[in-house]
């Protein structure tokens, strides 16, 4: 258990180390980040007299980086307790902000990128942006957006693009794009403030090596060959089609959190953190060659399968499984290895006991949530709202029934009936009304559940042959949540 004055070195997402100190302790620890960065783990004496890291990047207004973290949570792998120092007068001892240990190190990197990469005039334009509308000229198309917009969708642009139009919107840090490059990579290379890109239908060859991106997402397929910038920390490959044949990345992708459905491309053998979205059984041979893999997150889509080969990763310390209804205790890594953190969200209750017994007395910290009986799953495993019972068993079960009733009613409609869409409209309206009532009585629907409700609604509408645009308008008009 850490105490007041304890100093911890933190590995940073793009290499090097930061440091932080516990400035207050109780049920939560108050942890303040030092204004410190070094290539190697610092010695305790290096940090004597260091003050707090002041965050002023983007919309931050010059405040110390400080969080309350769970006092019972162990230090993440790679974090090193250095010893204890007196808490300096300039180190704050209280905060209303809560988070986890990794969030502390992320802010060190974001602040350094702001300080070292973003030109002063770009920072000044960002800070001085005021509410109102601005018209940006992209050549063949002028678009009008709020002056303080941070995400910009440019998929509507066609033909030659006047990229100087981006400069009219000084707070844009994220772009959405589609199709060929058409000058995109060059525009990003000269604008280090833009750090996130979502690219739909990319060409076969993509070179983003000169950009300053931290996050990159592909949709509607992935490029065949891909060059990544050394600043990248998150890469999501397109769900459609195969992964790239070859990726060029700094240190083999060591600093990248990779999200994939179809394996790991050549060139990313250094990746240490992977998130997978899968259907059916998961042969972890799809991750073959990841000798440095430390953290693995698997979320099952339908159908829900098991997994094999977890013992093949000698450095795997964190395993997170979601919708793991096909997983049995025997499929998990054996105790005694590198594994220290196991989280399973949504599983068969018949496996809760065996999983706990498998790791009893070991160093593995096990967290299970959302266990459901075989009887419940037999009726609801394909219900997209099934996990709502984890928040409120009674209200969640009612939401599942509402979906089942709507699904069965739409299933009885005839595709040849000219009045089918009208009948579907009534059924869909009743489904949303039931969810409105449940949310009004139980406060059940948060942001995540609203997205899940929307996905379920759109799936029902698609089964009834309702055009997606029309269905989306109905959902937004009818819902109260």
Image (cartoon, rainbow, N blue to C red):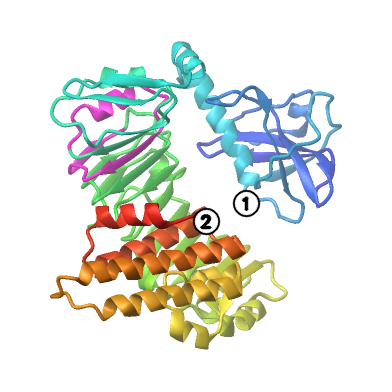
Q: Who's the residue at 48% across and 65% down the image?
A: 435
**On screen, residue 343 above or below 137:** below
The label number, if any, that marks residue 63 in the structure image:
none
Residue 269 as seen in the image, left or right of residue 448: left
Most extreme residue toward the top, as rendered?
121
Q: Residues within 10 Å of mark 2 (few under 14, many from 20)?
A: many
Q: Position of residue 134 (x, y in %)?
A: 35, 20
Q: Who's the residue at 50% across and 78% down the image?
A: 331
Q: Does the magenta portion include 189?
A: yes
| Closer to us: 358 or 478 | 478
Instruction: Read off the residue under disc 1.
Output: 77
Q: Residues within 10 Å of mark 1 (few under 14, many from 20)?
A: few
| Closer to us: 147 or 371 | 147
Q: Who's the residue at 29% across and 52% down the image?
A: 238
**On screen, residue 143 above or below 342:** above
Q: How many marks?
A: 2
* Numbered disc 1: secondary structure: loop
| Closer to us: 122 or 460 | 460
**On screen, residue 171 above or below 401:** above
The image quarter containing residue 430 is bottom left
**On screen, residue 152 above or below 472:** above
Q: Position of residue 164 (x, y in %)?
A: 28, 17
The image quarter containing residue 121 is top left
Most extreme residue toward the bottom, as rendered?
375
Question: N-terminal of the two: label 2 or label 1?
Answer: 1
Look at the image and give the residue range highlighted in magenta: 180-208
Q: Does the magenta portion include 253?
A: no
| Closer to us: 294 or 101 | 101
Instruction: Read off the residue under disc 2.
Output: 294
């Amino acid at each position: 258990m850490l105490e007041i004055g304890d100093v911890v070195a933190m590995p940073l997402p793009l290499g090097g180390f930061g440091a932080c100190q516990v400035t207050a302790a109780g049920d939560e620890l108050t942890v303040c980040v030092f204004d410190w960065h070094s290539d190697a783990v610092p010695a305790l004496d290096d940090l004597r007299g260091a003050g707090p890291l002041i965050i002023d990047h983007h919309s931050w207004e010059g405040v110390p980086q400080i969080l309350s973290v769970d006092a019972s949570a162990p230090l993440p792998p790679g974090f090193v307790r250095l010893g204890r120092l007196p808490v300096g007068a300039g180190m704050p001892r209280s905060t209303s902000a809560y988070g986890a240990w990794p969030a502390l190190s992320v802010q060190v990197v974001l602040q350094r990128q702001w300080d070292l990469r973003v030109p002063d005039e770009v920072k000044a334009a960002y800070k001085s942006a005021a509410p109102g509308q601005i018209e940006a000229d992209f050549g063949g198309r002028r678009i009008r957006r709020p002056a303080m917009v941070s995400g910009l969708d440019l998929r509507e642009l066609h033909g030659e693009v006047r990229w100087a139009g981006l400069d009219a919107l000084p707070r844009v840090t994220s772009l959405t794009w589609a199709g060929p490059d058409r000058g995109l990579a060059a525009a990003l290379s000269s604008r280090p403030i833009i750090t996130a890109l979502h690219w739909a239908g990319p060409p076969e060859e993509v070179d983003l090596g000169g950009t300053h991106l931290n996050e990159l997402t592909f949709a509607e397929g992935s490029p065949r060959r891909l060059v990544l910038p050394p600043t990248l920390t998150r890469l999501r490959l397109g769900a459609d089609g195969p992964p790239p044949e070859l990726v060029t990345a700094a240190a083999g992708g060591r600093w990248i959190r990779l999200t994939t459905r179809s394996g790991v491309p050549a060139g990313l053998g250094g990746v240490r953190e992977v998130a997978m979205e899968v259907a059916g059984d998961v042969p972890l041979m799809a991750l073959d060659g990841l000798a440095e893999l430390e953290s693995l997150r698997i979320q099952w889509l339908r159908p829900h399968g098991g997994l094999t080969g977890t013992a093949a990763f000698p450095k795997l310390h964190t395993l997170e499984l979601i919708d793991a209804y096909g997983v049995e205790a025997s499929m998990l890594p054996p105790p005694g290895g590198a594994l220290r953190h196991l989280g399973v969200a949504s599983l068969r209750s018949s496996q809760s006991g065996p999983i706990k017994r498998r790791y009893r007395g070991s160093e593995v910290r096990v967290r299970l949530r959302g266990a459901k009986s075989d009887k419940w799953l037999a009726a609801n495993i394909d219900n997209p709202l099934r996990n709502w019972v984890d928040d409120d068993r009674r209200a969640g079960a009612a939401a599942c029934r509402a979906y089942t009733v709507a699904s069965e009613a739409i299933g009885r409609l005839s595709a040849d009936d000219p009045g089918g869409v009208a009948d579907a409209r009534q059924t869909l309206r009743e489904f949303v009304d039931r969810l409105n009532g449940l949310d009004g009585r139980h406060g059940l629907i948060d942001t995540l559940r609203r997205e899940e409700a929307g996905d379920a609604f759109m799936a029902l509408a698609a089964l009834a042959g309702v055009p997606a645009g029309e269905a989306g308008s109905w959902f937004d008009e009818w819902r109260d949540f």
